[in-house]
Image (cartoon, rainbow, N blue to C red):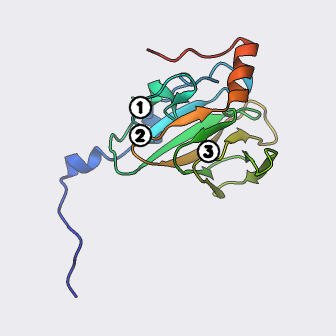
Amino acid sequence: MAETLPRFGVSRPEMLKRVARFADLEGSDGGLPDSRHPSAERRLYNVIGFQPPANSGGAVTSPVGDLAARLAAIKISEGFNLGYCRATPGRGPMMHNHDTNETFIAMTGTWRCSWENETSGVEHVDLAPLDVISFPPGVARRFENVTAGDPDAESILMFVIAGDAPRAEFTDEVMKQLEADGVLTPRPG
């Protein structure tokens, strides 16, 4: 048998451009429509990918927001994006949708992953560390830290989103709530 896939060597300096140390990541707590809502306070870390999507505006944005989309630790476009969310209990993004798959992996704590079912009701599952859930494109979803105990202790959720420049959109109901609450975060121009 002979190899059929292309193969080449990579220098150490080039490979080190593909290493991200969590302690060195620059997170962002703004840039999404719900960023100033008390229930949605969180810090997002763009590890791999997440370039700002074309044709964004209003409720449509990068899943990590425009600022974090520019802060990728590993700046590659190879068909997927990876990031982390850090939040205290009771916090997480509001109901939103993606144009590609989104997969969650609880790293620490307990995370509630909710979605709209076929009758527009909301269902959820709770993920313990290393549990995984994968949402298909087009399903409105949200995630929230529901870890018991210290209300100031942050937990971490990893997310992997398919595509090179995926788009996220908050639901009409969320956008109306943000407007009514007076906390709609203006997107940078």
| Earlier-in-chain disc, 3 versus 1 | 1
The circle drawn on residue 39 is none
| Earlier-in-chain disc, 3 versus 2 | 3
The circle drawn on residue 165 is 2
Look at label 3 and name its amino acid: Leu
Q: Nearer the viewer, residue 128 or 76?
A: 76
Horizontal and vertical percent position of residue 88: 71, 33
Asked if residue 177 lies left or right of residue 188, the reply is: right
Horizontal and vertical percent position of residue 138: 61, 46
- Residue placed at 34% from the left, 51% from the top? 78
- Asked if the residues shown at circle 3 and circle 1 are in contact, with their CB atoms under 8 angstroms apart, the answer is no
Q: Is residue 45 above or below residue 164?
A: above
**Disc 2 residue crowd, few under 14, some 14–19, many 20+, Cα 10 Å:** many
- Residue placed at 81% from the left, 42% from the top? 148
Helix, strand or loop under label 3:
strand
Of discs 3 and 2, which sits in the foreground?
2
**Disc 1 residue crowd, few under 14, some 14–19, many 20+, Cα 10 Å:** many
| Gap between marks 3 and 1 measured at Cα | 21 Å
Residue designated by label 3: 157
Task: Give the position of the C terminus as an image quadrant.
Answer: top left
- Asked if the residues shown at circle 2 and circle 1 are in contact, with their CB atoms under 8 angstroms apart, the answer is yes
Q: Nearer the viewer, residue 53 or 120?
A: 120
The circle drawn on residue 52 is 1
